[in-house]
Image: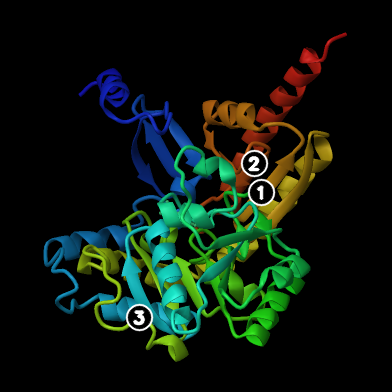
Amino acid sequence: MEPHEILQRQDQYVLPTYSPELLLVKGSGCNVWDSAGKKYLDFSTGISVCSLGHCHPVVTEAIQRQAAKLVHVSNLFVNENQPQLAATIAKKSFGGRVFFANSGAEANEGMIKFARKWGSDKGRHDIICMTNSFHGRTLTALAATGQSNYREGFGPDATGFKHVEFNDLDAVSAAVTETTAAVLMEPIQGEGGIVPASPEFVSGVRELCDRNGILLLFDEVQCGMGRTGRYFAYQHFGVEPDAMALAKALGNGFPLGAFEVQRKWEGVLTTSTHASTFGGTPLACAAGLAVFQAIDDEDLLINCQEMGEHLRGALIGLVGKYGKLKEVRGHGLMLGVEATAPVAPVLKEAADSGLLVLSAGKNVLRLLPPLTIRPEHIDEAIKILDSALEAWDRASVESVPA
Ligand SMILES: *Cc1c(COP(=O)(O)O)cnc(C)c1O
């Protein structure tokens, strides 16, 4: 079908909840191509999903092999891959037990259900969440999300969620009551503008939770799976959560989510208390296993740390050059540049010049390149970004009334 016909069908038949313009037809490594054959350097990675780059051969081969062997049997049966993937996640993190889902929102929903179930015989059901957080678009994940604009028109909100200022330990402390079950946070806020938790905040909240006998839940849907240079972002902070949610990069594009709970809480979600028809199929888990294998075999955590430093340095250079850029934030290859104005024109200009980058909120440029990236890709991206910023800077000077 001709590209213009496809775009026409998008307009006529797909609900307009998104407003995409670019039709992408293939990807390989750090690049994607549109329907006109134009090549882009992809620093958006499907929103931190294709962290190994597009169509990574190890993942593609694993999906192809498993698709020809067994796709789905439901969780009424054991499949060969799910226990292996659970063991791998546990080994790379805190040795807990894992439930498999299909998305970030579903993983968070399950983790919240875990916390409620844990608190059900203690009268504890409330979850303390952070301002500017993002936990997904299902109704309960939305109620946990600390940005009210996402909830507009979808009320009444699910109850049992309180929001306190992110990185404000006193605010969390003041919000804890005898009905509090858990504190939920992203170690590094993604959609909220690439805002890392401060080390004092994370260790302070951990202590606070221990002192009050409540749970600490981490949403690692965006910052997990090597994105920050460690397997999980919490590993930068020297504390462990009681549970964490994963999704996005877990399947490198094959839909897969999960939450893991500490082994001491393995008895909370007992038989029949939670389920997902599609969760943890042999096919999805084959993709997940291939992701871990590729990260280890190709030393991608090290590459992420090194390339993260390279990219951060180059971005700091741009902040020094353009007055409208304020600061660089983030860890590893989860980096944001805060600006004093909306960055949408920069995204558009960069895309026109062959670089896909994201925003996080209105004023933050968000860079999430593949963990496989090499210095020459970063240099090319910075060159394009530099020109895009220059055009942006020039345009805004021109638009200032004389
Ligand atoms: C993307 C994201 C989610 C939601 O994931 P979906 O797969 O879109 O449901 C939840 N939490 C965080 C931190 C995210 O970045």
Q: Quadrant of residue 350?
A: top right
**Amino acid type, residue under disc 1 in the picture:** Gly
In the rendered structure, which disc, 2 or 1, sits on the residue that comes first in sequence? Answer: 1
**Mark whose residue sits in front, 3 or 1:** 3
**Amino acid type, residue under disc 3 in the picture:** Leu
Q: Which mark is residue 269?
A: 3
> Which residue lies at the image location 53% right of the left edge and 30% below the top edge?
351
Q: Given the current orientation, which residue lies at the most extreme right position? A: 402
Q: Answer yes or no: is residue 50 visible.
A: no
**Amino acid type, residue under disc 2 in the picture:** Leu
**Number of other residues with Cα within 10 Å of mark 2, as a class: few under 14, some 14 to 19, many 20 or more:** many
For the residues labelled 3 and 1, the Cα–Cα distance comes to 37 Å
Residue that label 1 marks: 336
Q: Which mark is residue 384?
A: none
**Number of other residues with Cα within 10 Å of mark 1, as a class: few under 14, some 14 to 19, many 20 or more:** many
CB under 8 Å between discs 2 and 1: yes
Instruction: Identify the image quadrant of the C terminus.
Output: top right
CB under 8 Å between discs 3 and 1: no
Percent x, y for residue 360? 60, 44
Q: Answer yes or no: is residue 1 visible.
A: yes
- Relative to residue 395, is residue 54 drawn left or right? left
For the residues labelled 2 and 3, the Cα–Cα distance comes to 40 Å
Vertical placement of residue 19 versus 167, above or below? above
Vertical placement of residue 311 versus 179, above or below? above
